[in-house]
């Protein structure tokens, strides 16, 4: 099996090229947007979708986290403000996020397609994305909105631990590592993400609930919205998403079985 696309162009921006671009699928590439509160499981769904559809995972949160690892002296004032917003669990200003995505808009017409995760988060961002997609001459196949009760999301986020070395994700009770505080896969020390601290979690949930309804209305109006209850295993959520997408648009082929090769629609 091929290794997943490396996302160099997306994570670095500034004209960087991917060393290992996605393999174009046999049919048209998939272009999806994932919505849902932080902690609802968008990241796991993005991984599944990318593995099976051959698309690239474009997460704005990942771009900010990658930029935060760069030396402090290289930070622009806009980036410094973005990091402060992230630390508090607040949304980064629209203008900063939109320019960050605009700088990477070549990724939107990537031959492998994309799964956008964490963008757009506001109607202003959705409008900016719509214009960028029009410029690139590409459209969206679907917008999946993953939904879970608030208490369940807070519990998921506050118990989440991540490995900063290999990016594996654990949960204190739901998916604990074999040895407390140590990554099963690479032996790295597990940490709590800055914005998974309980205070930040509540701020993030407030930011989410304040912006999500108009965003859902935006995509519902365009008949692109697929609401997906996100309880159950990642596989169950994946299957439910495509079953619901097929109700909205019968022509949209469900992608249930694992791909046998890179890049092809199942
Ligand atoms: P995520 O990994 O998507 O939960 O993003 C982590 C943090 O990055 C968020 O809590 C925000 O502070 C910031 N962020 C990521 N994407 C966006 C966006 N589209 N709009 C505003 N802030 C964002």
Image (tube, rainbow, N blue to C red):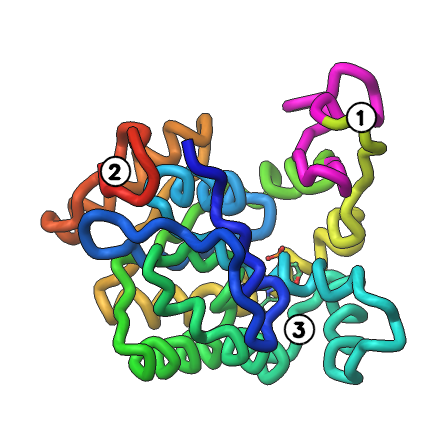
Above-or-below relation of 264 to 140: above
Residue drawn at 36 percent across, 83 percent down: 131
Q: Split into 4 quadrants, where in the image is the N terminus? A: top left
Q: Is residue 94 left or right of residue 83?
A: left
Farthest top residue in view: 178
Segment tinted magenta in the rendering: 161-185
Disc number lying in front (3 or 1): 1
Q: Which mark is residue 187?
A: 1
Q: CA distance from mark 3 to mark 2?
A: 33 Å
Task: Work out whether residue 221 or residue 128 is closer to the camera in this orientation and state it.
Answer: 128
x%, y% of residue 143? 34, 58
Indicate if the residue with disc 3 has its beta carbon within 8 Å of ligand 1.
yes
Instruction: Pinpoint residue 59: horizontal percent, then vertical percent.
Output: 54, 58
**Residue annotated with mark 2:** 255
Q: Is mark 2 within 8 Å of ligand 1?
A: no
Q: Are marks 2 and 1 in contact (CB under 8 Å)?
A: no
| Label annotation for residue 92 | 3
**What is the x, y in percent for residue 122?**
50, 73
Point out the frontmost of discs 2 and 1: 1
Q: Secondary structure at mark 2?
A: loop
Under tag 3, what secondary structure? loop
Residue 213, above or below 137:
above
């Amino acid at each position: 099996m091929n290794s997943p696309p490396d996302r160099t162009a997306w994570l670095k921006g500034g004209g960087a090229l991917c060393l290992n671009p996605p393999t174009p699928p046999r049919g048209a590439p998939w272009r999806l947007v994932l919505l849902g509160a932080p902690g609802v499981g968008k990241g796991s769904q993005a991984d599944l979708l990318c593995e099976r559809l051959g698309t690239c995972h474009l997460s704005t949160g990942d771009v900010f986290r990658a930029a935060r690892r760069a030396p402090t002296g290289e930070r622009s004032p806009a980036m410094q403000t973005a990091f402060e917003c992230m630390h508090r669990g607040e949304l980064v200003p629209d203008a900063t996020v939109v320019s960050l995505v605009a700088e990477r808009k070549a990724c939107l017409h990537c031959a492998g397609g994309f799964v956008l995760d964490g963008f757009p988060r506001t109607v202003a961002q959705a409008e900016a994305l719509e214009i960028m997609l029009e410029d690139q001459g590409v459209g969206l196949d679907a917008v999946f909105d993953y939904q879970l009760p608030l208490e369940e999301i807070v519990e998921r986020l506050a118990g989440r631990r991540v490995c900063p070395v290999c990016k594996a994700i654990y949960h204190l009770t739901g998916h604990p590592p074999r040895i407390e505080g140590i990554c099963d896969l690479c032996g790295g020390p597990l940490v709590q993400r800055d914005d998974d601290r309980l205070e930040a979690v509540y701020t993030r949930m407030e930011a989410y609930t304040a912006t999500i309804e108009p965003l859902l209305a935006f995509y519902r109006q365009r008949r692109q919205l697929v609401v997906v209850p996100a309880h159950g295993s990642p596989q169950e959520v994946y299957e439910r998403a495509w079953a619901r997408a097929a109700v909205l648009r019968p022509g949209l082929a469900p992608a249930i079985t694992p791909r046998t090769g890179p890049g092809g629609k199942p």
